[in-house]
Amino acid sequence: MESVDDVLMLQLDGLGELRSPVLLIALTGLFDIAGVATTALDEFAPIEQAVTIGEIDPDPFYDFTQARPTVHIDDGGVRSLTWPDNEFDVVRGSGDRDLVVLVGTEPHLGWRTYSACIRRVAELLGCEVVVTVGATADGVPHTRMPRVSGSTTDAALATALGIGAPTYQGPTGVAGVIHADLADAGIPAVSLRVGVPHYLMSAEHPQAVVALQAHLAHVLGVPVPTPTDDDADRAGEIARWRALHDEAVEADPQLQRYVRVLEAEYDRRAEAEIPSADDLAAQFEQFLRDRTDDT
């Protein structure tokens, strides 16, 4: 089994000191329904602002019959292979802090070593908190703003943010391993998850992307990212997919009735699963100040 030194490649020369860095992680796989989580974080590290400082070698971590490399041929006829990647990018100047962003592919193998690579990066860069983001199938109607829920194994952070410890028991993804590893290392970590309508999992959900980004950006005190593609007008995308979702539901009377039940249950709930974004932001900053004072 390879060690962290064998698979983690970092280039930190000239990087300099980071301002209150936070490590953000989104991985394709079990907790990235419809690509919502990875899409949300992709926009936190746009190419023109991000500096790639390292990567995890994919070779020991993947069954390439499941995550196959892809072949590309450029305009000059040059053929190249693209492998599942896990790159660490640094984005400076986002509000009052710098971001370290990993948008990667959930590994099939070697989870402990993969998690240890993430822990090593968090330690070397002095990341104050690690935040994993995910998207899960949920009983939320597509006609309402998706719910964002949070959890942490760090008691002080749970108290500061008013969220609880994880309650899920059963098979987990690599994110569960990462959180356990970070807890053992004394690095605070938070999991933020957005719900995606389980009856429309094969569709795209830009509204869920927006909900996840809004909470994450407000909590961290950084700007909400905007799409860089001229065609990727977020409001237009939300409207277009809402129309497509409506058409799919209208074509199925039984599904229409089910959505009305979900709407009634959603409206019945007086409070969201986590505090408001404003409250979270203030509490998160206070947690970091207290942690810095204690250190």
Image (tube, rainbow, N blue to C red):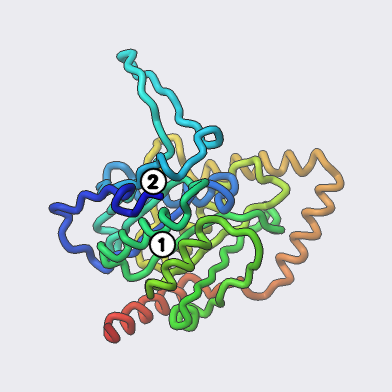
Q: In terms of depth relative to the viewer, which is nearer, 199 or 258? A: 199
Between circles 2 and 1, the one closer to the viewer is 2
Identify the residue at horizontal 44%, vertical 66% (top origin).
181
Residue 208 can be seen in this image: yes
Quarter containing the C terminus: bottom left
Q: Position of residue 116 (x, y in %)?
A: 38, 59
Residue 189 lies, with reference to residue 144, above or below; the image says below
Q: In terms of depth relative to the viewer, which is nearer, 92 or 1? A: 1
Number of callouts in the render? Answer: 2
Query: Dot 1: what SS?
Result: helix
Q: In terms of depth relative to the viewer, which is nearer, 132 or 261? A: 132
Residue 65: quadrant of the picture = top right
Q: Position of residue 70 (x, y in %)?
A: 45, 27
- Mark identifier at residue 217: 1
Locate residue 50 relative to residue 1 in the image: left or right: left
The residue wearing badge 2 is 86
